[in-house]
Structure formats: C-alpha cells, structure tokens
Amino acid sequence: MATREVIRIGGLGPLSPPGIVQAGRELRDGMELAAQRVNEAGGVLGRPLQLVFEDTMGTQAAGVAAVNKLLREGVHALAGEFHSLVADAIVEPVQRAGLPFVCASATLDAITTRRLGCVFRVAPPQSYGWRVYADFLAAEGFRHVVALQEENVYWNRGAGVIEARLRDSGVRFTRVPVWSATPSAPALVDQLERMMSRPPAPDIVLLLIAYPEPLRSVVSELRIRGLVPPALFLGEPAGRTVFSDWWDAAGGDVTNVPFLAYARPQELAPEGHRLSGRFEREHGREPTFVAFEGYDSVLALARAIDAAQTTDPAQVCHLLRRVEVGGTRGTVAFSTEPKGVVHQQWRWPPVGVVAYQYPYQRFSAAVLLWEAERGGTGATLRRDSQGRVP
C-alpha cells in the first residue's frame, strides 16, 4: 500500500544501549498493539494506521536524528520516548516541524513547562511524581534519606523535589554525588558507613544512578557490607525496578525496593485489561506501565485525527486539547493551566509507590504502598518490632 494511503505515527524509544532497551521495547510493543486495535476497528479516517518506530539509543543526539529520519519518512504525528533527557532534546525540533507529539513516558518538567503548542504528555511530570514518592518516605517513617546521585538534569531535579518535600516533613536528606562514569563503589559505600555511625543513621538509600553500571557495583558493595534490608533499604523513585534487567544488575536477593509506578496493580480500565491479555499472548510477558503509556499515546493521536477528520497538524493538535480517550488506566484528557507544568498534560494518570516482595515479580502482584490521591493503602514495607524487614 502506498505511503500516502496510510496514516503513519512515528514512534520513539531506546532499543539499544546506552538506553534502557527494555523500556524502548515496552513502548514499541504497546504502540504496535494500539495500532492493531485501531485498525481492527476500521482504522483512522478509513485508512490503516501504521507505526514506524525509531531507536533513540537513550542519547540526545540519536533522539534528534531519529526525529529527523521520521520527518523525512513523512509521518503524520509522533509519540513515545522514555528517557527524559532525550525527550527534552527533541521537543524543540518537533515544535519546529509542527507535528503533534504525545510524550509517553518521559517526566522532566521542562517538556511541558516550555508550553509548546505541539507537545502533549500522558506521563506525569517529575515534580508531581517525585513529591508523591517523598510523601511516602515521610509516612513510612524514614528519618534519614540518602541519595547516591549522578550529575545530570533529571537526577538533580528529582533529588531537589524530594529534598524540599522531606525538609517540610522534618526528614533529613543527604546527597552523595557520583561524579564519574565509573565511580569507586567502595568509596561511595565508605561514605554511607561513616554516616551510619552518626544519628540519625541513614535508613534508605535512593539509587539515582545508571544501570547496569554503576548500580551493579554499588549494590554488590552494599551487599558485601551488609547494608541491604534489614540494615538499609534501597529506593528507586525513577521506577526502573519494573524492568527485569534492573534485577539482573541489582541481584536476586534485593527485595522491598519501593519504586514509582504509573499504574495501580490489578486496577486497570477495561482497555488496560484488554491490552494486558493480548500483550501477554503475543509477547509472553506481562506489560509494564511503560507499555500502557505507549499504547495510550497512540490511542490519543488516533482519536484526535479521527475527530479532526484530517491529518493537518494544527487541527490534530486543536482536537488533542479537547478529546477524551478511554485509555488503559483511565480517561486520558489533556489539561492546560495558565502557567506551569500542566500544559497539554494528562492530569493525572495513576501515580503510586509499589514494591516487589521477590525479584522479577509480576507487576500485577506487586504491593501498592502509597497512592497520590489517597495516601497510605494500609500496606507497608515488611518490618519487625525494631523497624527491620523480617
């Protein structure tokens, strides 16, 4: 079929290192199933919907190159990306091209605070999600939170959100900078051990570092020195614990790692249950919330094009601001406030803190510890009378 007869959506995500490959695969697979779903219902404007997916490699340069390639191939809209720094680099070229872009998974506030007319987002902004995580830390009773943190915009902004929120709750927060691409894990853990000798001793360390390295080396060193639960909790606000290769790096004996998730275990909308069943049949694995985000971004674009009755970019953007879409985790609608981060932003997808009780656990069986809307769920990280994991 000729290209002009097909409505083409350009997908973006990391499918090769140094990007998180599993994240890119989840985005792509979710998007492809959304396109199948639309086509089975008759397509868009009576025409087939086709996904053309490009690898961003998790780098800004590759992300911009992927956008330019998709533009040359004549896509009608864009969706996707997982890495915030990549999404931050591509939104300006996307805006100049004038095509609608639904950001699926990247959370950096700057993506929407620029208030670009072509840029929409189904993932929550970092300032919202990481405040939720900080509220959980305070409610869980942690007294001294330490962040092992690499230096980049994403980690800096996230750590700043948590630090400010915890300060309001009277919880101590300490950053341990990770400056080198190959830091000395023993030296980092030496700093933690020195802190452990002074009250209030650290009781959770946030892993704001890349994986597989340096995360593998750092967690291995923590394990050697006994600084894993019950002595010291590990935290992952970025939500990467949902991917199996995170566990490959961290090791099979690390559990009860609270992480941010943008879906509630076992609480999906009808479209989410439909996707989950089909996804598992076709791919042999349960979808993560990243697959849901990819799926919802394509559904939103298809719905807007259909409502606009044209692929004209300005008309599609106009309709994206007005349509409501029955997504996998609820009704997707893009809000626009006079200023700030809520610009063409789904306000809000489900946001919560969950934990796995054993490695490689299915997300649907994870323990939901905290919800953005309702706070505590009654569940807590398992502890004995001394506050330790039994």
Image (tube, grey):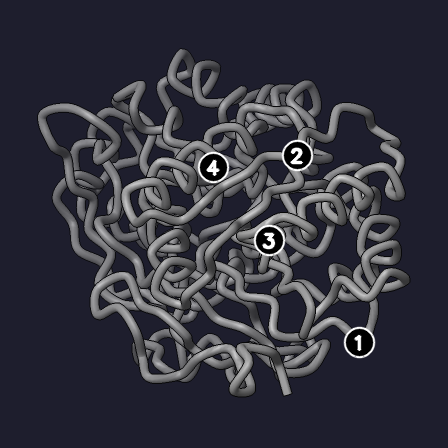
| Kind of residue at badge 3 | Pro
Please provide percent x and percent y for residue 146: 58, 45
Pointer 2 or 3: first along the chain = 2
CA gap between label 2 and label 3 equals 12 Å
Are the residues at dot 4 and dot 2 in contact (C-beta closer than 8 Å)?
Answer: no
Tell me the quarter of the picture where residue 222 sits. bottom right
CA gap between label 3 and label 1 equals 21 Å
Numbered disc 1: secondary structure: loop
The residue to which callout 4 is attached is: 158
Q: What residue is at 61 percent from the left and 74 percent from the top? A: 256
* Number of other residues with Cα within 10 Å of mark 3, as a class: few under 14, some 14 to 19, many 20 or more: many
- Mark 1 or 2: the one toward you: 2
- Mark 3 or 4: the one toward you: 3
Numbered disc 2: secondary structure: strand
Q: Would you say 96 lies left or right of 245 here?
A: left
Q: What residue is at 42 percent from the left and 70 percent from the top? A: 40
- Mark 4 or 2: the one toward you: 2
- Numbered mark located on residue 176 in the image: 2
Please provide percent x and percent y for residue 153: 54, 24
| Kind of residue at badge 2 | Val
Pointer 3 or 4: first along the chain = 4
| Vertical order, 222 against 389 (above or below) | above
| Kind of residue at badge 4 | Gly
